[in-house]
Image (tube, rainbow, N blue to C red):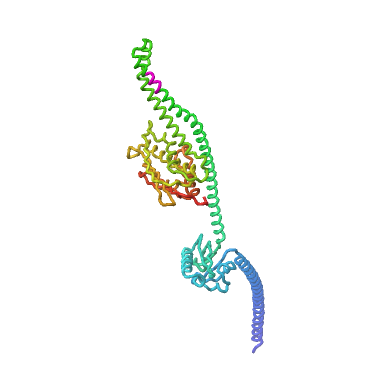
Amino acid sequence: MSIEELNQELISLRQCLQQLKTDNAELRQTVLEYINQLQQYKSEQQAALHERQRIEEQLQTTQQFLHSVIQTMPVAVFVKDAADLRIVLCNQAAEKLAGVSADEILGKNDYDLFPKEEADFFTQRDHEALNSKTLLEIPEEIIRKKSGESRILQIKKAPILDSQGEPKYLLVVRDDITEHKQAEAQLKQQAIELEQTLKELQSTQAQLIQSEKMSSLGQLVAGVAHEINNPVNFIYGNLTYANQYIQQLLNLLHLYRINYPNPALEIQTTIQEMEFDFLVEDLLKLLSSMEVGAERIQQIVVSLRTFSRLDEAELKAVDIHQGIDSTLSILEHRLKTTANYVQIQVLKDYDNLPLVECYARQLNQVFMNILSNAIDALEESLIQGNLSHTQPEIRICTQQLNAQQILIRIIDNGLGIPEQVRQKLFDPFFTTKAVGKGSGLGLSVSYQIITEQHGGSLECISSVDQGAEFIIKIPVAQSHKY
């Protein structure tokens, strides 16, 4: 090899060496960059690992917090798998509600925990919530625990959806409202009892007032009867003597006319002026009318005294018919024909009753209330022109049912009472009359007098256009409890 070739080869070697140095430098740079990248990746991985650990710790803390929240919630919480509705999560309140531990609940469905009928119902509601994909609220639902105890629950069911929007779980929250409902029912019952007590107090107060009024009326009637009785007896007693004296004087005048047929002119003139024959005839009629009027006043006084019966405030055996007749006597002015009404006819069908042991004055008050209402009904019908007949009437029938009980029926032929009104007739303060014309206490007090004080019964039978019939049944003798 020549020197020139050798030099040429040397130059080529130098170039190769230079290229190797250049390549080695580039390779070193590449390795350094790769090492740096590895170190950076390692740092990033470590940072990511630390972040993951932090997130996992945070997630674990959150899960523990949520678990604590769920476990301490006062309402029962169940989470069911949407596929088979088996319970995958429950809290302590759920254990208490079910009456079993979590181990006996998890993995079970409603058929494992409740009777089949209830499980069918609960499962149907579960599917309703899952299919609707919305919250389902059930205000009240009754379940039976394994112990047999029934509880009232307020339930909310909400589906938990996956990323595709399909139900994955079902959240069931059951709030036991049994005590609340019991307390509510108890409060309602107390409110009803308080309202009933208030009505009873109002009724008792009204009855006391009514009783006091009737007592005052009885005293007034008895006083008036007493004051009238003395002068009427005086007048009635003297009318007999006056009639005798006048008869004697007329007989004397008659003898004078026979024995002295031609009296003096002055006497004849006076006889003609005074119309002596008419005066004699009318004087006898006048005396007869005065006697009839005095007898009528005496009858009214007797009726007033019978009605008031102040001397019979305690139990006493009395003639029921006397009480009815005395009441009719007091109401007689309302039975007669007036400018507005035709006469109301009273028909009596009295049985042969024994003396009845009762509170006579209070029983007369019952007769007064019922008869007054009958007259009111007939008058109202006459005013409205609604009666299909022209003769309004009240029938009073008495009957001895047996040795222990009598019956009194008071019947009018008015327009009758609608059913919705008839059902409330004996309620305190109920009235269909205009304001100022009725207190709504008459029949209520009458019912109390008959049922509570006499151990009897008072009922009304009526229908529209068929009149009204009040039926009173009372015992002949009162037991000691009355």
Q: Is residue 251 magenta?
A: yes
From this view, report whether residue 415 is shown above or below residue 24.
above
User: Where residue 398 appears, x then y in whole percent?
Assistant: 40, 46
Q: Point out the residue furthest to the front here.
A: 259
User: Where residue 199 appears, x then y in whole percent?
Assistant: 53, 47
Q: Point out the residue furthest to the left here.
A: 389
The residue positioned 50% from the left and 67% from the top of the image is 167
Residue 137 appears in view: no
Viewport quadrant of the N terminus: bottom right
Q: Point out the residue furthest to the top here.
A: 265
- Please name whichever residue, 477 or 1, is drawn nearer the observer in this view of the structure: 477
Which image quarter: residue 384? top left
Q: Which residues are magenta?
A: 247-253
Q: Is residue 161 magenta?
A: no
- Please name whichever residue, 149 or 92, is drawn nearer the observer in this view of the structure: 149
Q: How many marks?
A: 0
Secondary structure mostly seen in magenta is: helix
Residue 454 appears in view: yes
Q: Is residue 319 left or right of residue 22?
A: left
Q: Is residue 467 left or right of residue 41?
A: left
User: Where residue 189 appears, x then y in whole percent?
Assistant: 54, 54
- Please name whichever residue, 273 or 428, is drawn nearer the observer in this view of the structure: 273
From this view, report whether residue 250 is shown above or below residue 397.
above
Which image quarter: residue 341? top left
User: Where residue 240 appears, x then y in whole percent?
Assistant: 43, 27
